Amino acid sequence: MNLETIYYVGQSIAVIAILASLAFVGYQTRQTNRFARTELTRALLAETREFADSISTSPEMSAFMFEAQRAKEPLPPERFYRLAMYYASWFTAVESAFKINEEGLMEPSVYEHIRGTTRTMDCVNLRIWWEHARPYHPRDFADDVDASFAMWDRERAKSEVVALKPKAPP
């Protein structure tokens, strides 16, 4: 074997080693991204649970939220302010989930779950709060929230129509 052949064999082995290294780096990057995606999802779900627990574990807070959600008229200003602080906190978490989902760093089904939890807050007071808060949120997120409201309104209208239909005699 002459020196030229040894040189080409050495170069071929070096190229194979470099390609293997690049493949391994790609694999590690993919695993790291999966881990980051899982951690972001877990953190947002924990934040969601923590927020829900902050409302449900206190009898006084549960009663307040129940009253606020069932109110047919806007709450008085001092009570509305308290409710608005909860809405602002919650929508900050939902907006974070929206942005993370947009970046592809969250499972879409998890975002839909987090987004869907805002439905439990849909009431006169939330609609009033959102009208004032909307301009302070990014347009894409605000449009997503508006789409949620529109969907909820369509579903509510359908259920009201179904409830109004007389039952056929047996």
Image (cartoon, rainbow, N blue to C red):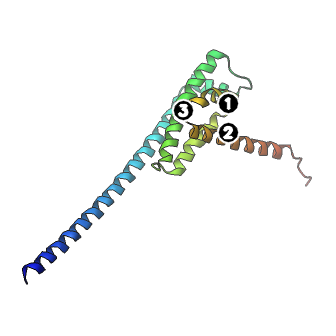
Secondary structure beneath dot 1 equals: helix
Give how far apart the Cα atoms at labels 1 and 3 are. Answer: 14 Å
Q: Decide which of 133, 3 is in the foreground and name it.
A: 3
User: Horizontally, is 35 left or right of 19 in the view?
Assistant: right
Q: Name the residue under label 1.
A: 127
User: Horizontally, is 16 left or right of 84 in the view?
Assistant: left
Between circles 2 and 3, the one closer to the viewer is 2
Q: Decide which of 15, 21 is in the foreground and name it.
A: 15
Mark 2 touches mark 3? (CB < 8 Å): no
Residue 149 — which label? 2
Give how far apart the Cα atoms at labels 2 and 3 are. Answer: 16 Å
Mark 2 touches mark 1? (CB < 8 Å): yes
User: Horizontally, is 24 left or right of 43 in the view?
Assistant: left
Categorize mark 3 by other alpha carbons within 10 Å: few (<14), some (14-19), many (20+): some
Compared to residue 31, the image places residue 114 above or below, namely: above
Q: Which amino acid does label 2 sit on?
A: Phe
Q: Mark 3 points at which residue?
A: 90
Compared to residue 100, the image places residue 52 above or below, namely: above
Question: Which residue occupies the extreme left position in the image?
Answer: 2
Give how far apart the Cα atoms at labels 2 and 1 are. Answer: 9 Å
Categorize mark 2 by other alpha carbons within 10 Å: few (<14), some (14-19), many (20+): some
Label 2 or label 1, whichever comes before in sequence order: 1
Q: Decide which of 58, 85 is in the foreground and name it.
A: 85
Residue 113 x/y as whole percent: 56, 45
Q: What residue type is labelled 1?
A: Arg
Label 2 or label 3, whichever comes before in sequence order: 3
Label 1 or label 3, whichever comes before in sequence order: 3
